[in-house]
Every structure is written in structure tokens, then in C-alpha cells.
Amino acid sequence: MLRRQFRLFLLSAAALGAAWLGSHQVMAAEDPGSLPYAKIEEVFTRGDALDRSKLRMYVSVASRQSGISPKQITLTIQSKSGNVAIPINAAGELGNFPRTPALRAENPTVVTNQPKGTLALTVAIGLVPPEANAVPAARLTSVLAELNKFIKAQTGLMSFVVPKLQNVIFEFPAATKATVTISGAGAERVLKADETGHVPIKDLADLSRANAQFTFSERPNRITPER
């Protein structure tokens, strides 16, 4: 099958911090006709500095065309030693992206089965969900402080335009009946997930100072940082 090359959208230093807020902001790659392997590998290299026990980087692809799901998208590294398919899960996340000295040296082209200019590459960083169904608010505040330092280091002189992360969104499967119970900060509160499965927390700093704790009816899929 003939594979058409595509424009994959990439993050600039200025957009990096904003995109890692979970906002999916993207910018055009320098070459609109192809995507070098090094462009994607660079994203993963930046994420190597993260403490993976606390933070997780999500690298995903999505079509800018309506009606195209991640399962319909393929990405292939056209290496001299043979084509290498990049795994993409149902959420569009790239899994087990191959990172080898040989591929870095060759820097082959990455192609897709989608039309040119229709794919976007997004990068998000989330807090690692706790193994237990509960987590202290202070724990989340501490991890957010580390993430803010990381983003400042990555964005350098542009860090002044990147808003500080102070809150989180607990993300559960869509249409779930999941709840988040807040205890230890006055009257107990029970928050229900919306139709997208999200439970936003807008007063994390106050809850942290009050030594509050979050208890989940089920473990969240993600904990996304918010402003």
C-alpha cells in the first residue's frame, strides 16, 4: 500500500509548557512533507528527566479530520534495516516507541496511512495515579511543584508565559459513575464525575493546607495538571 507522508505537528519551546498542561497545543513541523524520526525521539528524550514514580508523559497522535479514530491511524519508521510499526493504543498514545542508537544515527522518515497535514502529535504530562484508592492532597501539591520546576527548566526564557499549575483533574472512563470523596477539610464532600469522566479540583492548595484526602470509588486513569 502506498503510504503518504504527512505533516506531524510538533511543540516548540514556547508551546511546550502549555501543551504539557494537557491543553494539546501544537505547532507545525519545519518540514511539512515528512517527519524525521529525531523529531519524535526528541520529545521522549525531554521526558527522560521526569521522575517516573510521580509523573508520566503521554505522547499521542490524533487526526484533525472528523470521524478518524486512533485505531485507524498507523505510523511506520522507514528504516534501512526494515519498516518498524509504532504501536498506537485506543486512546492514540504511542507505546514502546523504539529508541536505539542505530535509529538515532540513521534518523529515518516516519510515515502514516493518513493524508498529509491531517495528524497532530500532542504531549501531556500527568501525575501518576496512586496504587491505592486514596491520596493526600499534599502529595499532589508536592508533585505539582516538581512539575512546575521541570516545565520552567524546559521552557527557559519563555517560562514567564507559562501559567503555574496549581490544580488537577481526576480522569475516569467516560460516562462512569465514579466519585471522589474529600475528607479532612471540614464537612465531607462527594464529587461525581461528569459525562466525560472528569472530576476537576479547583482548590487544591487550600485542601492541601487543611490536610485533606481524596478517596476514589475507583482508581482514576489519569490525574491531569491544571492552572
Image: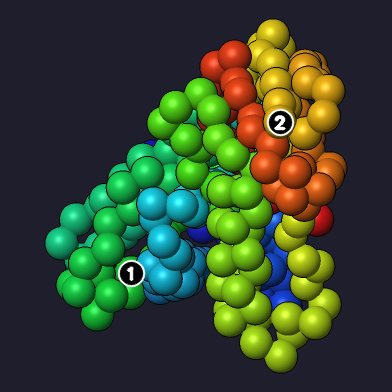
- In the foreground, 161 or 189: 189
Residue 223 quadrant: top right
Residue 15 quadrant: bottom right
Residue under the image location 68 percent in, 42 percent down: 211
Residue under the image location 27 percent in, 63 percent down: 99
Residue under the image location 71 percent in, 47 percent down: 208
Horizontal and vertical percent for residue 1?
38, 39
Tag 1 residue: 108
Name, please, the residue furthest toward the bottom: 157
Name, please, the residue furthest toward the top: 177
Q: Residue 120 carries which label?
A: none
Between marks 1 and 2 in the image, the one whose residue lies nearer the viewer: 2
User: What's the residue type where badge 2 is placed?
Assistant: Gly
User: What's the residue type where badge 1 is placed?
Assistant: Pro
Question: The C terminus appears in which quarter of the rendering?
Answer: bottom right
The answer to whether 187 is drawn above or below residue 17 in the figure is above
Left/right of residue 65 with respect to residue 33 in the rendered view:
right
Left/right of residue 117 with respect to residue 100 in the rendered view:
right
Cβ atoms at labels 1 and 2 below 8 Å apart:
no
Whether residue 221 is visible here, answered yes or no, is yes
Residue 27 quadrant: bottom right
The residue carrying pointer 1 sits among few (fewer than 14), some (14 to 19) or many (20 or more) residues within 10 Å by Cα, namely some
The residue carrying pointer 2 sits among few (fewer than 14), some (14 to 19) or many (20 or more) residues within 10 Å by Cα, namely some
Horizontal and vertical percent for residue 206?
81, 48
Q: Residue 184 carries which label?
A: 2
Q: SS class of the residue under badge 1?
A: loop
